[in-house]
Image (spheres, rainbow, N blue to C red):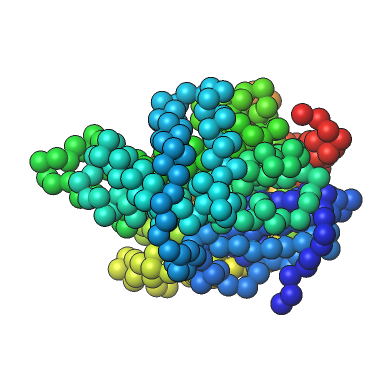
Amino acid sequence: MALPRADKADICLLLEGTFPYVSGGVSSWVNQIIRGFPEYTFACCFIGSRPEDYGDMKYTLPDNVVHLEVHYLHDFQRGAQKKPKKGDAEAYHRLSRLHDLMRSGEHSPEREALLGETLDGLGDGCCYSEESFLHSRASWNFISDAYREHSRDPSFVDYFWTVRIMHAPLWVLNDIASNLIPARMYHTISTGYAGFLGAMLKRRTGKPLLLSEHGIYTKERKIDLFQSEWISDNRGLVEKNNAEMAYFREKWVNFFTELGRECYQSSNRIVALYERNRQRQVEDGAPAERTLNIPNGIDLPRMEKVRAVRGEEIPQTACLIGRVVPIKDVKTFLRAMRTLVNEIPDAKGWIAGPEDEDKEYAAECRSLVTSLGLEKNVEFLGFQKIDELLPKVGVVVLSSISEALPLVLLEGFAAGVPAVSTDVGSCRQLIEGLEEEDRAFGTAGSVVGIADPEALGKAVAKLLSDPQAWHDAQQAGIRRVETLYTQQQMFGSYRELYQGLLEGEH
């Protein structure tokens, strides 16, 4: 399939691991935003890990997407045939000074100047070119000296390759920034690599940069890194300190923190979905005066039609709508189903979401169903159309260990489905309300602790077995979403941002 191409666009969306090749809440939101602003033309710059990690597009591109380009960060053939060279020792000395300033957390004119010099020097033939980084004596000395001064892990080989793998995507981003079509503004949907690309583009073009964070990228990467088994820890038993993070995990966390901080500093406006995440952005380096909250909103008329086809009976079905990946903690949902089935033997548990992102984890989840004896109760449905699914659901269940402001809860409420969720992100706010007027609507379900399958299962069982409590929760969710979380409210806030930035507000 040929990708749409154009010479320019009004807004360039910087998309890391999301729309249009990955389904899920953030991708749905991107699709929603593009379709909500037909007066603007959009370019989409998709950044993925490797081609084999993605399949076909999961979304039909809206007509106002005039340009789409796709890039992959991990191409291990880049620079493979280059020859050794001496390199610029003085340049790498200045780079070492920049890293010292980053470690200290200091923001100063010196740090800004050194960072600007570094970014300007990434191109071919420049002092920090990919060829120089991978093959020069100056780069080797820089990495070796940093290992001796800072590494708490004894393996130089692992240190060397960690540094190379960690930084290699920066030259991919530099190539993207050098060749991306002109846009009147850039809108990144995360910090991380996409956000750093936004910062690079802002420096080069002077065009406005808008950041919208759904989850806090650095927090989510920290969770991923703590769960990752590929990160080495070569310390012996005597050297290990359980209170201290393994060095290479810490190095990755610090790297993503710095990428995020540069994106925050470069963004004209910084959007969070709710107040706690806005505060977290400020703690992580976002200038407070540039931050604001814009909650997600749903297409209310569409979901009212979904609600209208519900039957009178309460479906004895608990449904987790999301990707089958560790951050969604599907295993806790499955264990909660064991508790639910013990109380309501005919209850059904559905997992509605793709399994191709982490096939090993998906296989473990399917094995867990067998070991729990839930083969007759639990079904993996794959990707489902929400309009067809929700009328058959009694309770939307969210067992995640990290979330922001999940669209699936809002869509469920508007479709007349209460929720039981772990206490993550804004889920308590959505279910119980925030301010006094909001809380007056009532509770739209229950909130339980993270990784507590018994509490999760009992909360679902309580709702499904008490029709009055279920109907009260249903009405609370409907009232809350109709009052506070509509698509029109969200579009109005983003229209104001887009217009202000496109008209030159800084």
Question: With 477 as the anchor, is 502 left or right in this view?
Answer: right
Which residue is at a point 77% across and 62% down the rendered structure image?
67
Q: Quadrant of the N terminus?
A: bottom right
Q: Position of residue 191 (x, y in %)?
A: 57, 43
Q: Residue furthest left?
A: 238
Of residue 58 and residue 193, the one placed in the foreground of this image is 193
User: Would residue 461 appear left or right of 293 to someone viewing this image?
Assistant: left
* Towards the viewer: 403 or 461: 403
Seen in the picture, residue 409 relative to 295 is either above or below; the reply is below
Left or right: 107 with respect to 472?
left
Name the spot of residue 317 as percent of width and height, x first. Answer: 53, 61
Residue 126 visible in the current orientation: yes
Please tell me in which quadrant of the rendered image residue 8 appears: bottom right
What residue occupies the far bottom of the structure in this picture?
1
* Number of numbered callouts drawn: 0
The one nearer the camera, 263 or 418, is 263
| Residue 392 place in picture, x, y as percent | 62, 63
Q: Is any part of residue 373 visible from this angle?
A: no
In the rendered image, residue 128, in percent from the top left (x then y), is placed at 50, 47
User: Which quadrant is the C terminus positioned in?
Assistant: top right
Q: From the viewer's perspective, is 265 left or right of 128?
A: right
Residue at 14% over, 40% down: 239
Considering depth in this image, is 494 or 299 the residue closer to the camera? Answer: 494
The residue positioned 41% from the left and 41% from the top of the image is: 89
Q: Residue furthest right?
A: 39
